Amino acid sequence: MLAGELGERSRDILRHLVDAYLSSGEPVGSRTLSQRLPHSLSPASIRNVMADLETLGLLYSPHTSAGRVPTERGLRLFVDGLLEIGELSATERAAIEARISPPTRGLEDVLTQATMMLSGLSRCAGLVVAPKQETALKHVEFVGVAPGRALVVMVTEDGQVENRLINTPPGLPMSALTEASNYLNARLRGRTMDDARSEILAELEGERAELDQLTAKIVAEGLATLAVPNHPEHTEAEKVLIVRGTSHLLDTVEAQTDLARVRMLFEDIERKNELIHLLELAKQGDGVKIFIGSENRLFSLSGSSIVAAPYANAQGKVIGVIGVLGPTRINYARIIPMVDHTAKVVSRLFA
């Protein structure tokens, strides 16, 4: 259902009811709405409209009181068609920019700082998905393990070791593997694979490398193999998930049922790959994306919302997502522009 399919009176009552609910977290009754509405309506007329909205699946009554709260469907309709998103003040914009320092210590440090800032301002958990940064290489070696097979051993400067198997041409002498190892070490040591790969391939294609044809083929095969993440779920394996400020999720706990919900939410956060996959959906298209409650399988039980926006690198390519995670009754009008501006600031920092 679209907001435009509701009558004007129904839209006004739904908008003011959701606004009141997001502020208080309590069911909203007809008397409260009669005081908030700009035009005069009797509590009886308001109750009739609320009953119609409940029939449409946009409101429900959590217990025997006369008050109503929005369903997830009602929240979605409100966010998509009725929400009046505020503008950040110049002071708020300046504060966000001042609290995200220039990236002198790397992308991950800046994003951690931005996530902590968002968490503090929103009183929710801040989160970000960032590309995993490559570590400079210390040593590469080709080791023959069987006829037609060789192992590529890659050691990074921080001590990580990766092994990959490659096919080798029939009758390849061991000296070719040694020569390929020496060639790559001379060009890769102290650099990341991304930094050096295109340069080495250009040298091989331009026949400037002092290598025979078989050895050059081994070098190209090794580069191609090392460029592919050695992980069955490589899309998620290449990503870093940063979560800060989860303690804020306890701020709204007022009853045992709330505590149970937050416990489930903490379990959802622990399911890193699923959370990364959800956030990756925010890369599609421009601007802020909002995920509400059971619209996604991950939060079907904990009843939580994510407001997230993509950020880009210097080439304008979207490389990650930053946002906040909280209960479905977060202050969308304030948090949406806050997340949007933070994502733009992060993009500018790396442009």
Image (tube, grey):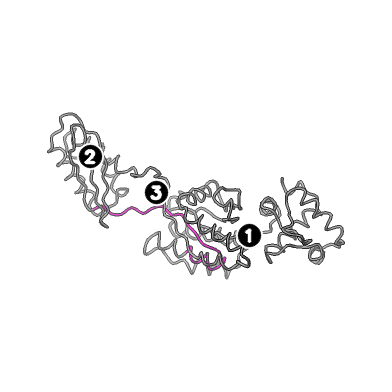
First in sequence: mark 1 vs mark 2:
2
In the image, the segment drawn in magenta is 114-137
Q: Label 2's element?
A: helix
Q: Nearer the viewer, residue 276 or 64?
A: 64
Cα–Cα gap, marks 3 and 2: 25 Å
Q: Label 1's element?
A: helix
Name the image quarter holding residue 329. bottom right
Q: Nearer the viewer, mark 3 or mark 2?
A: 3
Q: Amino acid at mark 2?
A: Val
Q: Amino acid at mark 3?
A: Ala
Q: Nearer the viewer, mark 1 or mark 2?
A: 1
Q: Which mark is residue 237?
A: 3
Q: Position of residue 333 (x, y in %)?
A: 64, 61
Q: Position of residue 21 (x, y in %)?
A: 70, 62
| Direction top: furthest residue | 170
- Residue at image coords 37%, 61%: 106
Q: Amino acid at mark 1?
A: Tyr
Disc 1 marks which residue?
332
- Mark yes or no: residue 316 visible: no
- Residue at image coords 37%, 64%: 104
- Residue at image coords 47%, 57%: 128
